[in-house]
Image (spheres, rainbow, N blue to C red):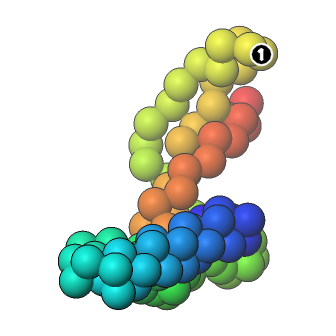
Amino acid sequence: MTGGARVAALITAGLFGAAGLALHLATGNGWGLIGLGAVIALATLFEARYRARQPEGAVQWQRTGECEVDVETGAVVEVWYDPVTGARKYEPVAD
């Protein structure tokens, strides 16, 4: 999640929590909104730990054995995979 998306999610969580609190004070109901805000906030805060980003040099790329034709260039590319992050990249096959 990008920094901007993280901020937007935390603002949304705060708005849900505040609306739930206001609803709870007015009617006695509002726990659902408070809970939803808490879930969004916790998911946003712990998401960064779930798939920590690594510097490009620290990634351990592995060949998948797959080759494809790049539709833009017509070149044959080989698929590489990072098992830690699930990222894929496509490198031209050496002739």
Image position, residue 24 (x, y; %): 31, 83
Q: Is residue 59 visible?
A: no
In the image, residue 25 sits, relative to residue 95, either above or below, namely below
Which amino acid does the dot numbered 1 rest on? Thr
Q: Residue at x 44, y 36 (%)?
A: 66
Image position, residue 61 (x, y; %): 57, 64
Image position, residue 88 (x, y; %): 55, 50
Tag 1's secondary structure? Answer: loop
Comparing 45 with 28, the one in front is: 28
Comparing 46 with 55, the one in front is: 46
Reading the image, the residue beneath label 1 is 73
Image position, residue 20 (x, y; %): 37, 77
Comparing 68 with 42, the one in front is: 42
Q: Residue at x 66, y 13 (%)?
A: 71
In the image, residue 48 sits, relative to residue 75, either above or below, namely below
Residue furthest to the front: 26
> For the N terminus, which image quadrant?
bottom right
